[in-house]
Image (cartoon, rainbow, N blue to C red):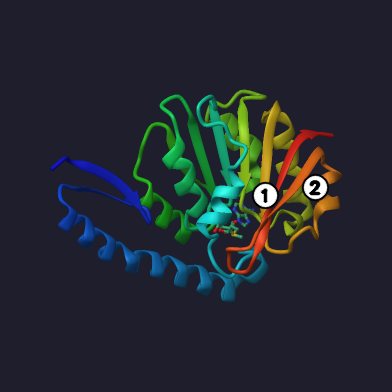
Amino acid sequence: MVADMTESNGIAVNYRSSRNRREHAVSVEPAKISHNILFLQKFFRHGTRIASIWPSSRFMARASIRHADFSSACCVVELGAGTGPITSEIVKRLNGQTQFLALERDPDFVQVLTNRFPANPRVQILQADVGHLDAILNDNGIAPHGVDCFVSGLGTPSLPESVRIAMFSAVRKYLRPDGFFSNITEVPLYYLNFYKSIFEHVSFQFVALNMPPGGVYHCRGMR
Ligand SMILES: C[S@@+](CC[C@H](N)C(=O)[O-])C[C@H]1O[C@@H](n2cnc3c(N)ncnc32)[C@H](O)[C@@H]1O
C-alpha cells in the first residue's frame, strides 16, 4: 500500500487503500453537488453577473487550457474562477515554477475555492474584481509581459464597459507577446467578432459536453 494524495472535487485527502479510495469517492460527491447548487442559487439571484447557470464541465475546463504549456509557464492567471472547475484542471498541471493566481469576485465562491485549493505559495486565490486587474497583478509582483496565459471564465462581452476596458488594458500590459487568452462561452461563435476586434488570431473550439453546450475562444496577439 502506497500513501497517496489526490485532489478531487477540490478536497485533498491522504488515503492508503482502495477501500479508503472508494470511501473518498463517495464522500466528496455531496461537496460537488453543493457547489453546483450554490452556483444555481447565485445565478437566480444575480443572473448575468454570474453569467452561467452551472459550473463548467471538465471538458470545457480542459478545452479552456488547451494551449497552455504548463512545462514552461511562469505565470497563469484565471479570471472569474467560480467554484473552481477550471482552477482544478490548472492546479493539477502546475509545475514547481509556475505562479498561479485565480480571481473571483463573489465571496461565497472564494470560500469554496479556498477550501478546495488550500494555501500554497504557488497558488493564490484572490477575492477581486477584474476591473482592478492591473493593481492586483502589480501588487502580486507580476512584471509587465510576465503572464503566459489568461484563462477567463467570465462573461466578458457582458461585463460593464468600464470593467471590460480596464481588464483588457491590464491583459495588454501583462500578457507576453506570444502568450494567449482564452474565454469560455455558452453562445457558440456569437462573440467571434468581439474577440477578433481585440486579438489578431482567434479560433473557436466547440464543446458539446457542457451544460449548456458552449465552447472556448482561443486568442493570441493583442491588436
Ligand atoms: C460563467 S461563471 C464561470 C465560473 C467558472 N470559471 C466555471 O467555468 O464554472 C463567471 C464567474 O465570473 C465571476 N465574475 C463575474 N464578474 C466578475 C468580475 N468583475 N470580477 C471577478 N469575477 C467576476 C462570477 O462571480 C462567476 O463566478
Judge whether residue 161 can be spotted in this image: yes
Asked whether residue 128 is in view, the answer is no
Q: Is mark 2 within 8 Å of ligand 1?
A: no
Task: Give the residue pinned by disc 2.
Answer: 195
Of residue 61 and residue 83, the one placed in the foreground of this image is 61
Q: Where the C terminus falls, by quadrant?
A: top right
Crowd class of label 2 (few under 14; some 14 to 19; many from 20; radius 10 Å)? many
**152 sits left or right of 27 in the view:** right
Residue 144 position within the rendered picture, expressed as x and y whole percent measured from the top left: 66, 24
Q: Residues within 10 Å of mark 1 (few under 14, many from 20)?
A: many
- When the figure is inspected, residue 186 is found, relative to residue 101, above or below; the finding is below
Indicate whether 109 appears above or below 30: above
* 168 versus 191 height, above or below: above
Q: Position of residue 61 (x, y in %)?
A: 55, 52
Q: Residue at x 56, y 31 (%)?
A: 69
In the depicted view, which residue is nearer to us: 161 or 74?
Answer: 74
Q: Is residue 223 left or right of residue 138?
A: right
Type of amino acid at the residue the image marks with label 1: Asn
Residue at disc 1, CB closer than 8 Å to ligand 1: no
Which is more N-terminal, label 1 or label 2?
A: 1
Which mark, residue 183? 1
Q: Which amino acid type is marked by label 2?
A: Tyr
Image-quadrant location for residue 105: bottom right
**In the image shown, does 65 or 198 lie closer to the viewer?**
65
- The secondary structure type at the circle numbered 2 is helix
